Image: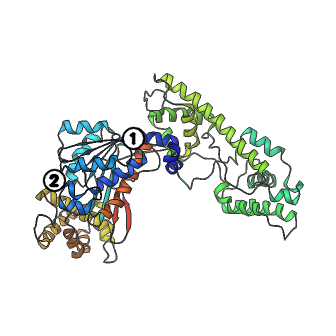
């Protein structure tokens, strides 16, 4: 039943990722349309539980901003109403609500947030987000603050340390070991007949991996260097010339050699030396992978075992997969089996090393052989990220990009600065521009002064140029929004925020580093590292 229910997402993050989601508890502070949309996506993904914290009651504006609320619920606590309807999406998900102000940041309140897998705030001020972050960040509880402000959407991700077991890099070069074939692969290649000894039909259906290995042998013989390997365009062209000699040997212009065409097309992607990505090297050199370390986190235990494997073999465990290619079924199946079998051998060795590390660090059997195999399969895709708490944002690059703009268009950097100015406005007046019945023309003047304050706090030299680049029409637009929350924008931003929660919960894919802005005027998104 589970395989059917979660079929599509299982293809994205697998059984292990789904298990992580099903063990996740998420706290969402706020119960507006944005909060509803975030939780809708997470509940359908199968999280274990959620809790909504808010003390707002349902009012008339909610009827036009939140599809989860009906007229008959006017006057009821919004958190209770939204929780009721969200729970109908998935019976297995536990839903709770707490009637409490989102701006209540007493220590005893913040301490309760430490029990959640991820905490999300919706449409709260920067000052409130800063106070929450100051408690969650040292405890390494992932925190996301999201907001919808008219046609703008903003998401900020803050996690002290975050490990990624699989970043799902689709552009990673395949692990084929052309420069250092393992024993069974080298024997298979050596036992395979020379290309020129094959019939035309057999040559046409020879996997291009075999073509590479055979051409590499002749390439090295020609150079009289048993370790030669093409590493630049000139050398790759010489290598391809050797392969063309094979093709020309058959002297058949009418015969189509798809495998040779594939080999030529893939040469820059596949014909590469075996290396360890710099990001992985940095992880393996982390002090938590040292022999004297006592770190008991599963990620670092496997990484310690991985480091010992690399110290023995100077390479990562074999990933075990090969690309699709034109081939007869016999040889392709044999090649695939060889790579898969060696991957299992490598993973078993890492698993034995993992058991050693677990024993040294006095922990039980934390890691299964299947987990170890999955980790080794994606060893080149592991990552380690370190974030910053809310409140340590640096707007220098934002202001600098505004000053450097060579046109009069409202850039995403400008909208981000305007949102920050709106927060400053709220902090000083306890309301957002364009609200409380104050004419927006008056608030526009006040907002402009706060924009100037933020620009003057930056460390760039062209402050006046940056200030003059922000058009009055954009300031007026922010005031006209009146901190409104159109559901269509909340739906899109909520979906993005839910994706970030899932990345943090599954330790798969790379979270935003560290902010993203959606501009509904131009239908653009942009990431910022603040």
Q: Residue furthest bottom?
A: 408
Q: Is residue 90 left or right of residue 256?
A: left
Residue hosting label 2: 75
Circle 2 residues within 10 Å: few <14, some 14–19, many ≥20? few
| Residue nearest the viewer, comparing 49 with 520 | 49
Total residue callouts? 2
**In the rendered image of this protein, does residue 451 appear above or below residue 496?**
below
Q: Which mark is residue 476?
A: none
Residue 306 visible in the snapshot: no
Q: Residue at x 71, y 61 (%)?
A: 262
Q: Quadrant of residue 147?
A: bottom left
Q: Quadrant of residue 436?
A: bottom left
Residue 249 picture location, percent across and down: 87, 63
Quick one: quadrant of the C terminus?
bottom left
Whether residues under marks 2 and 1 lie with C-beta atoms below 8 angstroms apart, the answer is: no
Q: Is residue 403 left or right of residue 334?
A: left
Q: Earlier in the sequence, mark 2 or mark 1?
A: 2
Q: Is residue 74 left or right of residue 499?
A: left
Residue 1 picture location, percent across and down: 51, 42
Residue 301 picture location, percent across and down: 49, 32
Residue 303 visible in the snapshot: yes
Scheme of image coloration:
rainbow
**In the rendered image of this protein, does residue 115 appear above or below residue 406?**
above
Q: Which mark is residue 92?
A: 1
Q: Secondary structure at mark 2?
A: loop
Q: Secondary structure at mark 1?
A: loop
Circle 1 residues within 10 Å: few <14, some 14–19, many ≥20? some
Distance of mark 2 from mark 1, alpha carbons?
29 Å
Residue 204 picture location, percent across and down: 81, 59
| Residue nearest the viewer, comparing 222 with 288 | 288
Q: Is residue 102 left or right of residue 196?
A: left
């Amino acid at each position: 039943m589970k395989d059917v229910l979660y079929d599509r997402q299982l293809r994205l993050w697998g059984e292990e990722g789904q298990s992580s989601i099903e063990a996740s508890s998420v706290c969402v502070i706020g119960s507006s349309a944005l909060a509803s949309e975030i939780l809708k996506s997470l509940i359908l993904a199968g999280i274990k539980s959620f809790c909504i914290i808010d003390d707002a009651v349902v009012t008339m504006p909610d009827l036009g901003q939140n599809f989860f609320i009906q007229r008959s619920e006017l006057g009821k606590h919004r958190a209770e109403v939204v929780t009721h309807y969200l729970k109908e999406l998935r019976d297995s998900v536990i839903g709770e609500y707490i009637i409490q102000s989102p701006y209540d940041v007493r220590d005893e309140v913040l301490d309760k947030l430490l029990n959640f897998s991820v905490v999300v705030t919706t449409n709260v001020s920067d000052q409130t987000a800063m106070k929450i972050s100051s408690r969650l960040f040292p405890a390494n509880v992932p925190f996301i603050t999201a907001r919808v402000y008219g046609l703008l959407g903003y998401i900020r991700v803050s996690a002290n340390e975050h490990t990624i077991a699989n970043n799902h890099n689709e552009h990673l070069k395949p692990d084929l070991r052309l420069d250092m074939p393992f024993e069974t692969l080298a024997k298979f290649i050596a036992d395979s007949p020379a290309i020129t000894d094959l019939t035309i039909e057999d040559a046409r259906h020879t996997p291009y991996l075999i073509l590479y290995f055979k051409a590499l042998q002749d390439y090295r013989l020609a150079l009289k260097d048993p370790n030669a390997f093409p590493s630049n365009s000139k050398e790759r062209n010489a290598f391809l010339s050797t392969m063309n000699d094979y093709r020309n040997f058959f002297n058949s212009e009418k015969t189509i050699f798809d495998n040779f065409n594939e080999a030529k097309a893939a040469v820059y992607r596949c014909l590469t030396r075996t290396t360890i990505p710099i990001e992985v090297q940095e992880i393996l050199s982390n002090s938590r992978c040292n022999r004297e370390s006592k770190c008991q986190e599963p990620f670092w235990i496997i990484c310690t075992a991985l480091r010992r494997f690399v110290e023995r073999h100077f390479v990562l465990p074999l990933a075990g997969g090969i690309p699709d290619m034109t081939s007869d079924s016999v040889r392709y199946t044999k090649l695939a089996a060889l790579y898969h079998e060696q991957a299992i051998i490598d993973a078993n060795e890492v698993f034995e090393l993992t058991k050693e590390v677990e024993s040294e660090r006095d922990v039980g059997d934390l890691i299964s052989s299947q987990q170890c195999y999955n980790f080794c399969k994606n060893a080149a895709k592991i990552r380690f990220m370190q974030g910053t708490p809310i409140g340590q944002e640096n707007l220098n690059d934002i202001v600098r990009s505004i000053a450097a703009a060579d046109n009069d268009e409202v850039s995403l950097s400008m909208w981000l600065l305007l949102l920050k100015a709106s927060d400053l406005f709220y902090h000083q007046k306890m309301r957002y521009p364009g609200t409380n019945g104050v004419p927006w023309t008056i608030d526009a003047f006040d907002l402009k002064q706060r924009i100037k304050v933020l620009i003057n706090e930056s460390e760039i030299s062209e402050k006046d140029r940056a200030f003059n680049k922000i058009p009055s029409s954009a300031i007026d637009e922010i005031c006209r929004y009146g901190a409104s929350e159109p559901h269509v924008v909340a739906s899109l931003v909520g979906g993005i925020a839910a994706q970030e929660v899932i990345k943090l919960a599954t330790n798969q894919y790379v979270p935003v580093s560290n902010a993203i802005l959606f501009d509904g005027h131009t239908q653009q998104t942009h990431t910022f590292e603040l």
